[in-house]
Image (cartoon, grey):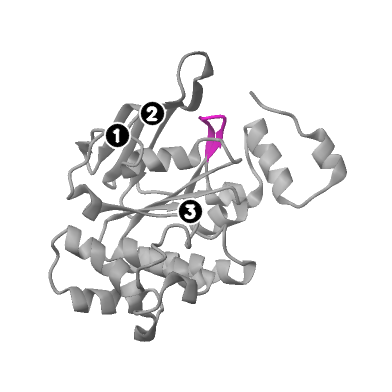
Amino acid sequence: MSDPLALTVIGVENLRVGFGGGAQSFPAVQGVSFSIVEGEIFGLVGESGSGKSTILRVISGLNRDWSGRLTIRGQEIGKRRAKRFYKTVQMVFQDPYGSLHPRKTVDAILYEGLAVQSMDDRQRRIERVLYDVGLQDGFRFRYPHQLSGGQRQRVAIARALILEPRILLLDEPTSALDVSVQAEILNLLRELRVRRRLTCILVSHNLAVVAHMCERIAVMNRGRIVEELDSASLRAGVAQDPYTQQLMRAARGYDRAIADSFVDFD
């Protein structure tokens, strides 16, 4: 459980996001509120389309069409962000290949963020962050297509960390990877979170992943948080909301009788 006296690093109040307009408008996020304290890793879990990634895109500044209130380390954040904001908040995306420029080397990808933020000592910073994510210096001048999926995701993590952020947003960081590589990346993220004193939000549809990584978890359905629980409750299968209970049953593996019992929660 999080320390109630710890500093609230991320505050989200009554967040609403809609896509489209008029009769075709779709409410992707409907009145979501939560807070995250310093050093915590907070999970957002739910089916595809439940609004998890949309929330991350709002916090990261990628989506400017929203209403509600967002605070970072006690300061209210608007829809347009100053350049220095991105030294505090960085995001790791789901697809490690699609998020890396295919015609730039690892070195160029990492150098770009340092140049935008006018950070000095760039050679040392690149060497250090590659070491931190478990890549040898020989990977520095390779292109994304010359790397495995796990190596590409390590580069994506390095790109986020090289600006020395305090907040890391993780959007399904292992779902595009082979099962054999997923545990390596998750363990790396846990280690980096402790070593760099990061505050994180992890989005996933995998209950086992969030139970392994997070202290607290918010369960989302159709743009709303239906329940918030701690990792111990999730691992024990203890939940109050029927939708959360259904997710837990689904996570145990396919069973025809269980699948036939599922209902569509509004």
Q: Residue furthest right?
A: 257
* Label 2 sits on residue: 15
Q: Which residues are magenta?
A: 219-228
Q: Crowding near pointer 1: few (<14 within 10 Å), some, many (20+)? A: many
Q: CA distance from mark 3 to mark 1?
A: 21 Å
Viewer-nearest residue: 9 or 3: 9
Residue 82 image point, x, y percent = 17, 43
* Label 1 sits on residue: 70
Q: CA distance from mark 2 to mark 1?
A: 8 Å
Query: Which residue lies at the image location 18% right of the left edge and 73% below the top edge?
Result: 122
Label ID, residue 82:
none
Magenta stretch holds residue 260: no
Res. 196 in view: no
Q: Amino acid at mark 3?
A: Cys
Classify 108 as above or below 227: below
Q: Are marks 2 and 1 in contact (CB under 8 Å)?
A: yes
